[in-house]
Each structure stands twice: as C-alpha cells, then as structure tokens.
Image (cartoon, rainbow, N blue to C red):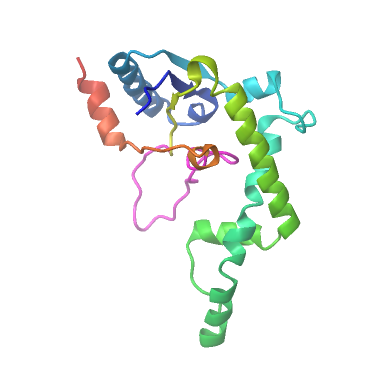
Amino acid sequence: MKRFSSIIWPTDFWGIMDQRQAELAKKFAQLIERELAVPFESLSFEEIWADAPPPGANGQSLPDFINPATAALAYDVYHNCDEFRAKHWEMFNHAPYTTIPNERLWAIGKKISEDERDAGFAQIEVYRRWFTDNILTGKHANALTILPLETMTPRYRDEPPTFKRPPQDGINALSLAPVLHSPILAVPSKTIFNLAVNYN
C-alpha cells in the first residue's frame, strides 16, 4: 500500500460544523500527522478554485459551478423508482411512504431532464479533473483528506429532524471519494473524542 503523502484539512467543509467538534477532529488529524510523520495542511478548495479555475467554469465560484451539477443527479434517484411508484399507486391508490430526505430528492429529481442530468455528470468530471490536477498534486499527491459528515447532537424520537445530512451541497463529504474514485474510511466520533482527549 502506498504511504500517505500529507493530510488535508479542508476548511470549507469544517467551517460550518460545531466548533468544539471540529477542534476535537482537528486534534485527531494532528495525531495522525504525528503517527504517520506526514505534513498537515489546511486548504480551502474554494480559494484554490478561485485562483485556478478549470476551463469551462466561466467565472463561476466552486459552489455556483458544482451545486447545480450534483443536484441534477437527483434525476436518477427519482426515475429509478418510477416502476415502484407506479405499482404502489396501482395496488394501494396512493403514493408510497418514503423518508423525508428521499422526498426532497424526489421533488428535485422530477423537475430535472435527462439532458440536465448528463450535463451535471459532465460538470462533475470537470471537477474531478480539476481536483486531481490542483489539489492532489505535489506533496498532496496521495493525501489523506479529513472530512466531517455532520455535527452530532442528541436526536429524539418525537422531534422531527431539523438537521441536513450531509450539511453541504455540491461535492460533499459523502460524495468526494466516489467522485475521485478513492477509498473512504468513516471514523466514529466517539473514537475521535477518546483518542483526542486521552492521547499523550
């Protein structure tokens, strides 16, 4: 297995998280830095994009370019369930129950055309090539990127969820690895807390 060349702390992702949890996660990342003896660096993908945008970005910021592209992927989420919805209506004469996040995706997906979906995939490929050429290069060629999934808080059964998972639109913590064709490892927050607090 190839050694990690560095650790990237993407500030655009961590800036919207609970500050205390972000600090604990950063301590965890710095423990990894010491253990692996590789450099740790905070980077803003949005700033790097602004300084070196890809051809075809047309002056758009990173969020303005990529957020609509990833939203267009809801086309498949919606249309992959066309047959299921039709059969459910036929059998029960009403729409099927689904989760709140899925309802949101279906609501977006039903308004998107196949051409818009294809254009979204093309923009994601532009992002993938840009990321490889501008982030995963030099000392970051085989970087370990530390990303948050969400701020952890108590969630009670009788209260509807008010959080958004993942909290970012566009290429978020759940989609970055698949877009880059990279492996992903999720570390439970309890593990991070214990290591960050108890490490000597």
Residue 135 visible in this rendered orientation of the protein: yes
Give the residue drawn at x 51%, y 56%: 101
Residue 179: percent from the left, percent from the top?
55, 40
Verify whether residue 171 appears in magenta. Answer: yes
- Magenta stretch secondary structure, dominant: loop
Give the residue drawn at x 41%, y 13%: 39
Residue furthest front in the image = 1
Residue placed most toward the observer, 196 or 144: 144
Residue 2: percent from the left, percent from the top?
38, 25
Verify whether residue 129 appears in magenta. Answer: no
Residue placed most toward the observer, 175 or 21: 175
Classify 134 as above or below 187: above
Residue furthest right in the image = 58
- Position of 184 with respect to 31 (left or right) is right
User: Which corner quadrant of the image does residue 195 belong to?
Assistant: top left
Classify 43 as above or below 75: above
- Position of 154 with respect to 59 (left or right) is left
User: Which corner quadrant of the image does residue 168 belong to?
Assistant: top right
- Position of 31 with respect to 60 (left or right) is left
User: Which corner quadrant of the image does residue 75 belong to?
Assistant: bottom right
Residue 191: percent from the left, percent from the top?
25, 33
Query: Which quadrant of the rendered structure holds the C terminus?
Result: top left
Give the residue drawn at x 70%, y 36%: 64
Residue placed most toward the observer, 148 or 140: 140
Residue 10: percent from the left, percent from the top?
50, 25
Query: Which quadrant of the rendered structure holds the N terminus?
Result: top left
Give the residue drawn at x 57%, y 60%: 77
Q: Which residues are magenta?
A: 150-175
Classify 10 as above or below 148: above
- Position of 170 with respect to 38 (left or right) is right
